[in-house]
Image (spheres, rainbow, N blue to C red):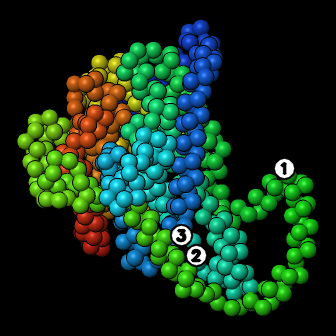
Amino acid sequence: MQMLHKLGRMPIALTAPALIMFLAVVGLPTCLLFLSSLNSPHFSVVNYQAFFSQYANIRVLYQTVEISVVVTAICLLVGYPTAYLIAAASKHLRVALIVLVIIPYLTSMLVRTYAWLVILGDGGLINSVLLNIGLISSPLSLVYNRMAVYIGMVHIMLPMMILPLVSVMAGIDRSLVSAAQSMGAPPLRAFWRVFFPLSLSGVRSGSLLVFVICLGFYITPAALGGLGDAMLSTFIASQVRTSFDIASVATSAFVLLAVAFIVLSMLGLNLSGTPGRTVQSRQKVLGKFYPSIARLSGILNEVSTPNRAKHWASQLYRPGRSSAWLKVASFAFITLVMFFLLFPEILILVMSFGGSKFLEFPPSTLSLQWYRNFFSDPTWYGAALNSIEIGIIVAALSTILGTLAAYGLSRTIPQVRSFLTLLLLTPITIPVIVIGVAAYLGLVKLGLIGSKTGIILAHSVGAVGYVVVIVSATLANFDPRLEQAAKSMRASPYRTFMRVTLPLIRPGLIAGGVFAFLHSFDEVVITSLVSGFSVRTLPLKMWEDIRHQIDPTIAAVGSLLILLPILCLIVLYAVWQRSGARSQHLLLKPTI
């Protein structure tokens, strides 16, 4: 009991378990990797010189950045109008559209990659349809090229662009745009001068998230791309599996990490800046660094002022109007985006019930043979049991450690909180291949390579980050005066936490645990590095089969993995509804 009182006075100590695990598994090994890349103890840049002296390395690095930039740009061009239409929809329609975006976001990356192999392959859906209607005489080369990589990566990353944009756009007051239009501004100008600057924080967050994750992509480019589409993460993974020259691996990993940090430093700073200053700061920067452009802009502004004044007077106080064709175009656009996100999953679901020896859409006969094959094959259901066991333990461990860390961080000073939060979120904010290499080195030092314990620790490092984010968001809406009231009634810190704090943040804990489980259940990059070929999880089994054959059993497994996030969403919704009803009566219960 005295320990609880001490922890109450020093809440930062609650972050210690999560920090210790992070430092042991990833933090200290990352420092050792950096020293190895600098040729410690002699300290030189000879390894970096060797890396950049080889044209093949520069080519792979350029391809990695190029693919990441293109995918980010496409996701932004498609995701921004999608998020705008979702945020502008009615409440019930907005919730339904967000759920439709979240479902593919939570679906296994391997399943979605496999779906595009089925769609784009030589015997896939598109080629089969074109051959049957006579438009082509031989299959088109739609897979194992750069375009297939772009399609697969955009499909996987688009929800990660849409969701941050929707969260920002939903908080923008639409009356500001209406006010601008009522004062004579055309709809496009009102959007560009009012709405767009207020949404830039979502643009920045979504773009950073997509770009950094794309840098570490490994599965999708390897499955859908050709030899000329390899990314640096594929190069690093092959080095680890073959020679594992620690200096070479560390150098490649930190070159990739340097690219991520350069972009983060360029776009990720001053995140707390007020949106209202965006336009003014942009004009100041333009005038400072591009004076000739600024002067030309001023001249054009003076010339166009009379015409704008006349247009402003004619449009003054007129309400904004939306034409019928714009509504039709918006409906068609959002329908196409949802079709792009959901059709691969629907395709896998339908094809999993086929009775043929080969995948076909629509199935000529219906059968459950591929499901029976999954449940009767020890290699399949054994891998699934391993994934479930590891996922449950990871969810429990990361929920406990992440909740303690989030609770402690919420009660520390802002400077310390920002630093420790950044540290705990590192595993989910830098390329995953770098985390995998660091975890491999750390688990080698601990003697846990090729064990379930090692995989659990490697997964938990990233899962804790998700729990910290979700529980911290829940605690941000928690009123600390409730705890103070309980303590004023002589409730102990433990009893206060159990009777007041825990019931109110329980939805966040459950949501964090669910996301931690899904993170572990779908993880394949880190697992492939630390499993040591002795522990087979379901994603590893699927990845091996995808690389060597198109086994229809994967369709049955994929359909089960598609249903898994839907079930999790239903559970979360039920918990949230129940928690809302219980929290209304919480204060009526005695706390001592």
Task: Estimate the x, y position of residue 505 in percent, counting from the top left.
Answer: 33, 59
Cα distance between the residues tagged 3 and 2? 13 Å
Which amino acid lies under the numbered mark 2 shown in the image of this protein?
A: Asp
Which amino acid lies under the numbered mark 3 shown in the image of this protein?
A: Tyr
In which quadrant of the rendered image does the N terminus lie?
top left
Q: Which residue is mark 2?
A: 173
Task: Estimate the x, y position of residue 462 in percent, counting from the top left.
Answer: 38, 40
Q: Earlier in the sequence, mark 3 or mark 1?
A: 3
Residue 84: numbered disc: 3
Q: State the residue lying farthest toward the top.
A: 42
Q: Which residue is mark 1?
A: 289
Give the foreground label among 3 and 2: 3
Placement of 478 over or under 457, stated as above or below: below
Q: Residue at x 89, y 69 (%)?
A: 300
Q: Earlier in the sequence, mark 3 or mark 2?
A: 3
| Nearer the observer, 383 or 136 | 136
